[in-house]
Image: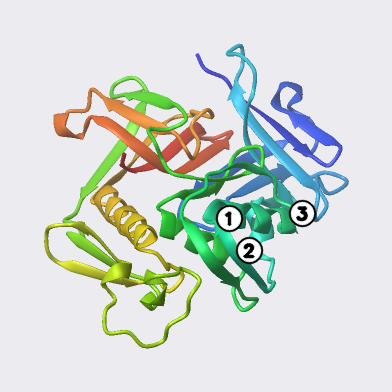
């Protein structure tokens, strides 16, 4: 028999299910993290207590696990952003580290930097630690403008390079390509899998062309040219099938960068043709940046390895502890 456990640390206060029941004990916890959603979040519900279980801005850590099954697994680090109280319950919402990037607006110009260096600098200005920031594409120039958040600029760089962008459970930023996954978690039909869905769609495009900035830099990548008869030096192509997707990327100013952006865009399109979700008994060790391997499903062609694109952990006293993983082709 599995007995789920939680440890909720907010500010200097800690609630551990091992000391439950106590006044104000946790009633439910829900964590949502998604590669395609700007900010991950936790919503926690508590029983009535004499004082609020948190204050706005408090640092939050949520750990989940099972009794007598090893140590807790850290699943979230963030800050309290809202508190809703009633006569019987208090609900606390906390947002992850990328919320700081989403709330930062500033104007900067970068010259001769890699995409990873720009991401690291913007994260530092937002006060977000960086776990990994791979170099990505070399950018002769990149402008950050305050009408868009720092997160939107960082997200654009991730899309350009074909990288994933997310905060890990410690609250540190990851800017890196998916290369098989930090870890692969096996999910077996008839053992852990409670529900399963798979969607297969034709690709939105079979080939990609990326056009960069006006190619005066065919001779010098720092040159600026407004009129040109030949843009081919800044054309990147990937794929052979129809339909064609044309992408204009003014920040791209070399042929190599255009080709890298085209390859990244086509790879993203291919991964998105096969998506689904699986719900299992609680698996707190599964997180963004990982892969899952499905085994034993009646639809044999659905078995295999996939990239984790979203994770939702739900723990409450009525329904127990479950994990829902949205995945896409790895």
Q: Residues within 10 Å of mark 2 (few under 14, many from 20)?
A: some
Q: Quadrant of the C terminus?
A: top left
Q: What residue sits right under mark 2 in the picture?
A: 102
Residue at 25% x, 30% y is: 304
Residue 166 or 75: which is nearer the viewer?
166
Closer mark to the observer between disc 1 and disc 3: 1
Query: Does the image show residue 291?
Result: yes
Residue at 43% x, 83% y is: 225
Picture coordinates of residue 214, whole percent (x, y): 38, 78
Residue at 27% x, 55% y is: 266
Q: Is residue 141 left or right of residue 88?
A: left
The secondary element bearing badge 2 is classed as helix
Picture coordinates of residue 58, whole percent (x, y): 81, 49
Question: Hey, which residue is sitting farthest front in the picture?
Answer: 219
The secondary element bearing badge 1 is classed as loop
- Marks 1 and 2 in Cβ contact (< 8 Å): yes
Q: Earlier in the sequence, mark 2 or mark 3?
A: 3
Query: Does the image show residue 85?
Result: no
Q: What residue sits right under mark 1 in the picture?
A: 39
Numbered label attached to residue 92: none
Q: Residues within 10 Å of mark 3 (few under 14, many from 20)?
A: few
Q: Is residue 157 left or right of residue 64?
A: left
Above or below — where is 294 with respect to 219?
above
């Amino acid at each position: 028999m599995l007995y789920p456990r939680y440890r909720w640390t907010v500010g200097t206060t800690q609630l551990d299910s091992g000391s439950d029941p106590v006044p104000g004990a946790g009633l439910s916890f829900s964590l949502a993290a998604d590669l395609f959603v700007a900010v991950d979040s936790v919503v926690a519900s508590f029983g009535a207590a004499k004082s609020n279980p948190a204050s706005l801005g408090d640092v939050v850590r949520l750990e989940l696990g099972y009794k007598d099954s090893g140590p807790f697994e850290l699943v979230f680090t963030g800050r309290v952003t809202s508190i809703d109280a009633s006569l019987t319950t208090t609900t606390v919402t906390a947002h992850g580290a990328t919320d700081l990037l989403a709330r930062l607006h500033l104007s900067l110009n970068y010259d001769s930097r890699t995409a990873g260096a720009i991401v690291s600098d913007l994260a530092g200005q937002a006060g977000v630690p960086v776990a990994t920031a791979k170099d990505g594409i070399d950018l002769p120039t990149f402008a950050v403008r305050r009408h868009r958040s720092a997160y939107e600029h960082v997200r654009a760089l991730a899309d350009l390079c074909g990288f994933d962008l997310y905060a890990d459970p410690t609250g540190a930023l990851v800017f890196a390509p998916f290369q098989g996954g930090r870890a692969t978690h096996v999910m077996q039909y008839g053992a852990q899998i409670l529900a399963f869905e798979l969607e297969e769609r034709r690709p939105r495009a079979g080939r990609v062309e990326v056009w960069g900035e006006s190619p005066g830099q065919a001779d010098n990548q720092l040159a600026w040219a407004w009129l040109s008869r030949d843009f081919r030096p800044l054309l990147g192509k990937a794929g052979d099938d129809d339909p064609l997707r044309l992408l204009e990327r003014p920040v791209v100013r070399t042929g190599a960068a255009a080709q890298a952006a085209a390859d990244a865009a086509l790879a993203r399109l291919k991964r998105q043709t096969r998506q689904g979700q699986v719900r299992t008994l609680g698996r707190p060790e599964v997180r963004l940046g990982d892969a899952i391997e499905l085994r034993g499903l009646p639809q044999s062609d659905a078995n295999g390895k996939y990239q984790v694109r979203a994770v939702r952990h739900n723990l409450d006293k009525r329904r127990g502890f479950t994990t829902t993983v949205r995945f896409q082709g790895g």
